[in-house]
Amino acid sequence: MNRTPSLPMRSPSPLSRRGALALLGVFALALGACSDATPIAEARDQGTGAEVTVEGYVSMQPGAFVSALGDEGFALQDDTGGIYVKLDPKQSFGLGAHVRVSGTLDEQNQLRILKAVAGDVKLLSGTKQVSAAEVTTGGVNESVEGELISVTGAITQAFQDDSPYGYKLYINDGSGEVQVFVHVSAGFDKAALQALTVGQRLRVVGLAAQYETTYEVAPRAPSDLSVVP
């Protein structure tokens, strides 16, 4: 059977080489752009006013704390730490979304925040639910601020109405009392909170936050607060 003779391979022209090098350059730049995010713990340590880019997974959904913080922000967490991202308008992604944010470090009532605009928030591929770290009630402090945590303790001070911002409870596991701040905008039933009594044990999952000199745990939704038998 006759076969068509194969043609000799041609060496790439100088233009082809240049084109390949250009493509390699673009690829290298793209890789560099994907690797310049600062670990959140490192970013938090920079001075107020510093411009940083961080990347992580959403640990608190957009808009849950608008009643007290006055914006539609969300919390972001990586393997090193977490931070509250302050911005408007409300973003469409939810818990576990992979997000990259560039913004300016600041503080709001001594809570470390990252101020950003919607154009500097980029939704990335992939999702991962952030697990809450178990922390003692006395261990809610600057070392965990901005992170998703879980605390369990007996109610020491029952429901206090701080609306239109939120509601307060206090619990203690024996290591020290911590404030549980329930934002009005997080969707809790006020009557159910009022029915809780001193001595009941609560498990609370929420963002470790700060208001002035008080550290607190802020649940994101009703499912984050449960009575422990």
Image (spheres, rainbow, N blue to C red):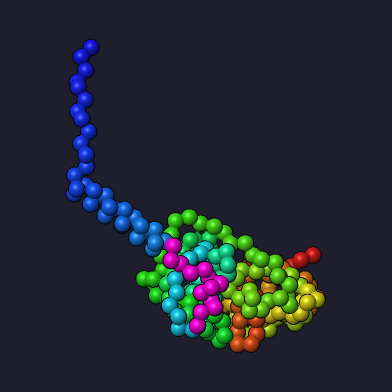
Q: Which residues are magenta?
A: 35-47
Specify the farthest residue to the top: 1
> Residue at horizontal 48%, vertical 55%?
126
Instruction: Classify residue 165 as left or right of residue 173.
Output: left
Front residue of 121/5: it is 5
Residue at the image position 74 percent from the left and 70 percent from the top: 152
Q: Nearer the viewer, residue 153 or 200?
A: 153
- Name which residue lies at 36% across and 71% down: 119
Residue 38 in view (yes/no): yes
State which quarter of the image contains the N terminus: top left
In the picture, which quadrant includes the C terminus?
Answer: bottom right
Residue 6 position by quadrant: top left
Magenta segment includes 140: no
Q: Is residue 186 visible in the rendered structure shown here?
A: no
Residue at x-position 21% and y-position 39%: 11
Looking at the image, residue 128 sits to the left or right of residue 229; the answer is left
